[in-house]
Amino acid sequence: MLKSHSSLRRIAATLSVVAIGALSLVNVSSAGATVPAASNWVQSGAPLSGPSPRYDSSMVFDAATGTTVLFGGFNGSELAETWTWNGSVWTKLSPAVSPPALRGAAMVFDAATNNVVLFGGLSATGLSADTWTWDGTTWTKLAATGPSPRSGAAMAYDSATHSVVLFGGNASTGPLSDTWTWSGTAWTMPTLTSTAPVARFESSMAYDAATQSVVLYGGKGSSGAISDTWTWDGTNWTKQAVASPSSRFGSSMIFDTTSNDVVLFGGNDGTDNSAETWNWNGTYWILVSSATNPSARYLSAMSYDTLSGSATLFGGADASSILSDTYSFNVAPSAPRSVKATSNTNTQSVVTWNAPASNGGSAIIGYTVVATDVTMASRGGQTCAATTATTCTVTKLTNGDQYVFVVTATNAVGTSASASSNVVRPATAPGAPTITSVVPGAGQATVFWTAPTVTGGTPVASYRVIAKPGAAFCHVPRGSTSCRIVGLRNGARYTFTMTATNAAGTSVTSVASALVQPRTLPSAPFITTTSVAGNYVTVRWTAPKSNGGVRLIGYNVYVGAVPSGAGQRIALPVHYTEFSYTFQGLKGHVVYIIVRAVNVAGIGPFSNQVAAIVK
């Protein structure tokens, strides 16, 4: 077994913390799940110009620059190289300032300061207690005192407390069990009120954003490999009463924001290396199977890329050699986001969504949409699919039924959890109403109808009636069977049509009504003269100024023996073309005369009243 100190897994913890920002975009937590998310290790075809074989390097995803940073390691001697990995290509950097050649240094991304933090490690001249930061361009040594010199310490960024947490490591006197926190400017040793993990080094640590706690696993103590699991809540350590992977040290560990699980790989039990992958779901450990695996190894460098949603593993040592291969740990994508369904078309619905927050480290190869009929389950199950598009149309739905749509994303590893849409009701526009009658009035008309026999699958919301010629209309809500259109011109001839509207659209126009004429009563005629010849009286008048919009039918002449008694007088009809009337009265009596015009709307008001004496 090659001599080593574990710094990479503590690194992993770091990057897992970075992932906390992305955690809010993940819809489904794996805590309590019976099986882990689909996952797979894929070896990268990285060029030979990448880092040389090494183990016990420090590696972390730098969220500020969007690249993975690797420093140092051991290949027979300590190394001082700085490399970056963009997901497909390694690039060796030449910063103006750099830490000395180190192995077993602890490294994390400090999300509070947006810098990579490196602590300790083992150099050719001994153990280090230096604190360095990487800003994406160069390294800076900080004048900070804190933990004693050590290598193989476990370190993670605790996003819940916005601080870096460091535990244990290997000092010149042996394994350590102290806990330190880094605020971005200073180291502090917190006062614990509970039992801390036993002294160890080359343990694995990551921040579990799903449970908001730091997870510590295994390591190497004074008696050999350890297999316990601990969590840090920002104040104290708690030992988890759970079966853990077998004893091992030098394992690599990160938090995967896509699956919401901590992922652990490899390690050494003191005799043999491991090629196992485990998930910690916040409650218990689950052994993960993968179609492909990196070879058994320990002290590999591993980090989690929160942008691509995949873990990167580099190098390490197996039973006989030092390695330089690069792997990515891919999982199924996270669920699609912001799923929305819109149904305003006959028997179909358009479903849209946003791409998952994480593709799991492998490109999305397709989306599937499945309909659930809330009204009658047996009518559901319709599907549609898309490749790169984030929309598709589900057809063959039942108008009037309510539907919910679930969308899943698939990559080369597997299929995501589903995300649901809002409830919608496919429908088509209703049929046209039927106009049954139109009653004209003074400058208006009241239109009556019956509702459409075909609603289109969703209730009629409103009706609209339009008069022609012109654009006068009335608009009334569902349940109405008549409405009145005003602003019409008396005497003009109008037809009326109407439509019905529901959530899906507006019906075709109804059959037009018969022609009607709005009208009102005629105005009063005016009596101009009366003449008496013997016992005959002749009254003459002029036509009313308004005929009410329609031709007059005639005039009613009222003759009576007393004034203001027209209601009791006999009405004598006269043709509308006549403007005088002669009648015989009683000799020596006074008669009172009133005239009213008549049209199809009725009898108009009284004219002026005149009196005549029969001779």
Image: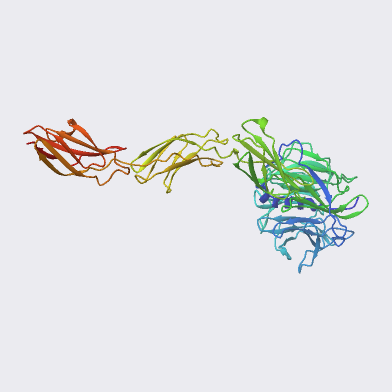
User: Across the whole image, how many numbered discs are drawn on residues?
Assistant: 0
- Provide residue 592's location: percent of width, then percent of height: 13, 36
Quadrant that contains the C terminus: top left
Residue 539 appears anywhere in the view: yes
Q: Residue at x 33, y 41 (%)?
A: 519
Depth order, front residue of 252/403: 403
Measured along the vertical axis of the image, is residue 338 above or below residue 62? above
Q: Position of residue 288 (x, y in %)?
A: 81, 41
Residue 365 locus on image (x, y percent)? 76, 48
Viewer-closest of 286 and 6: 286
Question: Is residue 92 left or right of 133 when viewed as pictured?
Answer: right
Q: x%, y% of residue 612? A: 10, 39
Taking the view exactly as shown, the residue that stands out farthest to the bottom is 96
Q: 506 or 49, which is in the foreground?
A: 506
Q: How is the image coloured?
A: rainbow
Q: Residue furthest front?
A: 534
Q: Residue 521 sits in which quadrant?
A: top left
Q: Is residue 561 above or below residue 217?
A: above
**Vertical placement of residue 35 versus 361, above or below:** above
Q: Looking at the image, can residue 250 be seen?
A: no
